[in-house]
Image: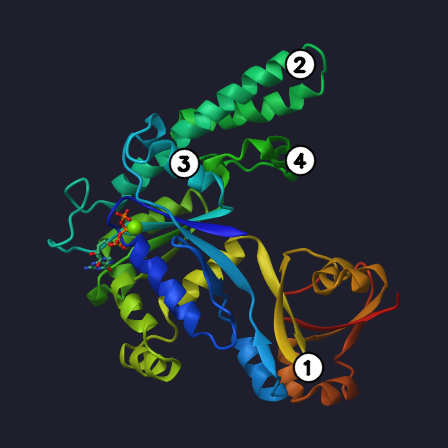
Amino acid sequence: MKIGIVGLPNVGKSTMFNSITNAGAECANYPFCTIEPNVGVVAVPDERLDKLTEMYHPQKTTPAVIEFVDIAGLVKGASKGEGLGNKFLSHIREVDSIVEVVRCFEDPNIVHVDGSIDPIRDIETINLELVFADMETVDKRLDRAKKNLKGDKKYQAEIDVLEKVKKVLEEGKPARVLDLTEDEKELIKEAFLLTMKPILYIANVSENDLENPDENEYVKKVRDYAKIENAEVIPLCVKLEEELSVLDKEDKKEMLKELGLSESGLDKVIKASYKLLGLMSFLTAGEPEVRAWTIKIGTKAPQAAGKIHSDIERGFIRAEVVSFDDLIKCGSMVQAREKGLVRSEGKDYIMQDGDIVLFRFNV
Ligand SMILES: Nc1nc2c(ncn2[C@@H]2O[C@H](COP(=O)(O)OP(=O)(O)OP(=O)(O)O)[C@@H](O)[C@H]2O)c(=O)[nH]1
Ligand SMILES: [Mg+2]
C-alpha cells in the first residue's frame, strides 16, 4: 500500500518526504530503506508499541510500515502532457491514496509557480488536471461498455456508474465526492480513477502560524474546501519538521515541548495516512517480539491470523484478545486473565484497532 505525495512545484513535497524518511530511519530496530530515491518505507508511530516494549522487554519491536512516494510537482496542462505530464499521472495511478501538500506559507525567497499564495487556486489546478485525466479514462470505458452491452446486458450496471462519475467530473469535481455503494465501486475499480483515491491535505504553514494554525486565513480556506470531499486537513510546518527530523528522540521531545506541541506534525501525517489507506494494526506481544501487524479495517480474526502465518489461518481455533487499554490497566497479561478481560473470540470476530492477540490453532 502506497501513499503518493502530490502538489504544485516548490510547495514542500520533497522536504516533507525527506523529513518523513529521516524520522523513520531513527526508529530503532526497523531496517529502514529507501527503495528508490523517491520511495520510502516509513514506520507508523504507535505509542502502544512503546508501552508494550516497556512491559515485555522483547528482543525486538517491529512497527507497522507504509510506503510514501515523492511525486514530482504537477503543472497546469499535465493531462495534456505539460511538464512531466503523463509520467506524473502514471505515478499517481500507482498509489493507493494521495497526500496533497498545499502552500500556505509566505516567503518571498521561494518562488510560487503562479506568482502568489492562493491555496484554493492551487488545489483546483491539481484537481482539474486529475479530473481531465479521469474524463478521458471514463469516456474510453463508456465506449467499451456500450459496445459490450450489445452482447451482454450485464454491462448496463457499469455504464450507469460511469455516467454518474462522468457527470461529477464534468462539473470539475473529483469522483470521490460521490457517495457510491461498495457494489458500484467494485464495478469501476479497474478504471483506477485518480480522483477516486482517498485524499488528505497538508496545509504547509510558516512556523509563526503553527501555534494557532486555524487562525491562518489560508488554512481556513483549505478546511472549507476539504469539507466537500470529506477530507482531513493537517496544518504542518514542513520546514520545522525537517529540523525536527534530524534530532534524536529526546532532543525532539524537548524541542516539541518548547514549541508547545504534543507530537510532531509528521507523526500525525503518517498516522492519518495509514487510516486513509483503510488500514489498522493489531498487536502481538511476547519476549521474542512485540509487533504491530497491518490489516484492513473490518478484517476477521482468521484472516488477521493469516498475516502472521497461513498455517494459523488454516488451523484457526480461536483468538485470545485483550484490548490495549485493559492490558495497561491490569499491568500484565496474567492480571488481565484473572480479571476476565482476555476474551475468547471465534472465526467471525472483527478485529479492532489495538487488539492484543494470541491465536490458538491446530494444523
Ligand atoms: N519558508 C518555507 N520554505 C519552505 C517550506 N517548505 C519547503 N520550503 C522551501 O521551498 C523549496 C522547495 O521545497 P521542495 O520540498 O523541494 O518542494 P517540492 O514540492 O518538492 O518541489 P518540486 O519537487 O519541484 O515539485 C525549498 O527551498 C524548501 O526549503 C516551509 O514550510 N517554509
Ligand atoms: Mg520535489
Image: 325 above or below 78:
below
Q: Position of residue 215 (x, y in %)?
A: 25, 60
| Label 2 sits on residue | 149
Q: How far, Cα to Cα, is label 4 from label 1?
A: 41 Å
Which of the two labelled residues, at mark 2 and mark 1, occupies the earlier sequence position?
Answer: 2
At x 74% / y 57%, what residue is drawn? 303
- SS at circle 2: helix
Amino acid bearing label 3 = Leu
Q: Quadrant of residue 143?
A: top right
Between circles 3 and 2, the one closer to the viewer is 3
| Label 1 sits on residue | 286
Amino acid bearing label 1 = Gly
- SS at circle 3: helix
How many neighbours does mark 4 have within 10 angstroms: few (below 14), some (14-19), or many (20 or more)? few
How many neighbours does mark 1 have within 10 angstroms: few (below 14), some (14-19), or many (20 or more)? some
Image: 244 above or below 66:
below
Residue 89 numbered mark, or none: 3
Q: How far, Cα to Cα, is label 2 from label 1?
A: 57 Å
Q: How far, Cα to Cα, is label 3 from label 4?
A: 26 Å
Amino acid bearing label 4 = Asp
Instruction: State left or right for residue 83 relative to residue 144.
Output: left
| Label 4 sits on residue | 183
Q: How far, Cα to Cα, is label 2 from label 4?
A: 19 Å
Which of the two labelled residues, at mark 3 and mark 2, occupies the earlier sequence position?
Answer: 3
Q: Position of residue 159 (x, y in %)?
A: 60, 21
Can residue 350 be seen at all in this image of the molecule?
Answer: no
- SS at circle 4: helix
Check the image and name the residue furthest to the top: 150
Can residue 4 be seen at all in this image of the molecule?
Answer: yes
